[in-house]
Image (cartoon, grey):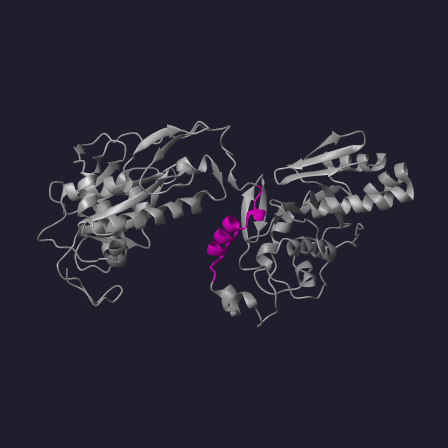
Amino acid sequence: MTTVLEPAGQVAGARAVRRVRLRRDASAAPSGARGLRLTAPVGALDLPDLLAGAREAVAALAAGERTEEELAALVAGRDGDAGLMRWQLTRRRLGLAGLLEHAVHLAAEDGEEPLARLRPIGRGAAEPGPTPDPTGQVKLSRFASAAPEDGALLVRSPGSPLAVELGPRAAGLLAALADWTTPAGLARLPGELPLEAVRQTLRLFAAAGLLAYGAPGQEPEADEQRFAQWAAADLAFHSRTRRPTASAGYGGTYRFGDRFGPEPASPPPFPGEKVALAVPDLAAAARADRPFTEVLEERRSVREHDDGAPLTADRLGELLYRAMRRRQTFTGGDGQELADRPYPSGGAVHELEVYPLVTNCAGLRPGLWHYATDRHELELVAEPSPATAALVANAREAALMKADPQVVLLVTARFGRVMWKYETVAYPLILKHVGALYQTLYLVGTAMDLAVCGLGGGDAGDFATASGIDFFTEGTVGELILGSRPGTLRTDVGVPRRETKR
């Protein structure tokens, strides 16, 4: 690579300078008599038997930014031309291992200002490609996102292990790239950058996957179904959590382990009224239940309740006991208090809680309740209010019901239980747990001849208002409606069934 100079643009005497350094989360340590070992969150790279100039060049990269010419001169001065050729191979290994950051600076008479930096944030090669043509059409991908990080604006594309960090002068390029343009057109904007600085910045954009393919009137991101079907937020979530190479940390990394302690398995009890629930006889239930295959085949979403014979507190308690009671607690090797319930949970963290929102349940007054899984009792969280009414109305509309559901089971997650240990996969892991709990409630409810219907969405803000629980600490991640099952089921909603009577 070479440093590219550009005649003065809008900034008198300004020119583009390309620099490189070791990625900021990497470190270099001696290895053997003449080698170095480079370590980063994504792995390690051994560089054995380096010549003196090459070792100095790597040390210079670890200390700060250098131009390629400065590195070449350093190596050639110590190792000669043969050593310089060896350095080029080492330098390529560093790039392919994702251990380098590439920067574009705007240099003027009064100093240099960083414009953009290509940052490896995951696992993968970090080498920019060719410089774009001045007249070539460019546009920002509709999937790109920008957020502040480490005091700079970081722009990312879903699934890419690279991101571009923008300085204040280059941040204006984002707005100009909202529609098709050219590097030359960007350089002509008032107060913007010299052409070569624009081209070098776009070179980093392209390496990070931030630019759209195509041309005006021919945009695959908008025209092809495989791209058009994705909302930007959905693709970002899918790519981040299903492409481990896009993140430095993935799985049980305990990234907050040195800052916060693990949360206990049980939340603090609510101060309101307590209702002890009857403990069902599981042996009797096992004898009375229909065979598993029959229960599985008869499982369906039931959106109608028998308000003439509503659900009872005992039946609600039996469902909760069989589906999600705490069977035991134990301490994991990491010191976190773990739990065992009837449904599975990654790492046995069991972060899910259930809040029955009662409108019509015999033996239980209306209101928002919390099921204490360790004590098998209900705790009153809130009396009926406009906020709880909004939750009931949302559930009724989502289920296409003609009347209010007898009980809405609001499933929440205590986020810190999972996020203390897991990185990147924490929230999708919560959603997997919700699915496991949904199916467990469905099957137990079917075995008990109850009406169960899982809902596809809800309003976590309404729950926060109704419960008084902090939105970021614990929030709803699922909802089901529950009630007594009528003798005749509706046929105008749901999956058509020949058998509608029980």
State the residue in front, 421 or 260. Answer: 421
Is residue 233 located in the magenta-colored stretch of the structure? Answer: yes
Position above or below: 169 against 364: below
Does 342 sit left or right of 416 as displayed?
A: left
Of 118 and 109, nearer the camera is 118
Write down the quadrant of residue 350 in the picture. Answer: top left
The answer to whether residue 380 is above or below residue 179 is above
Kindly report the secondary structure that dominates the magenta region of the rendered protein: helix
Apparent side of residue 218 relative to residue 395 in the rendered image (left or right) = right
Q: Residue furthest left?
A: 308
User: What residue is rendered at 81% in x and 32% in y?
Assistant: 34
**Does the magenta run of residues contain 450?**
no
Residue 173's x, y, as percent?
A: 62, 55
- Pick whichever, 284 or 241, lies toward us: 284
* Picture coordinates of residue 466, whole percent (x, y): 26, 42
Specify the quadrant of the image occupied by residue 385.
Answer: top left
Q: Quadrant of the C terminus?
A: bottom left
- The answer to whether residue 339 is visible is yes
Q: Which segment did they paint magenta?
A: 230-248
Question: Closer to the camera, 270 or 441?
Answer: 441
Residue plotted at (58% across, 48% down): 245
Q: Is residue 385 visible?
A: no
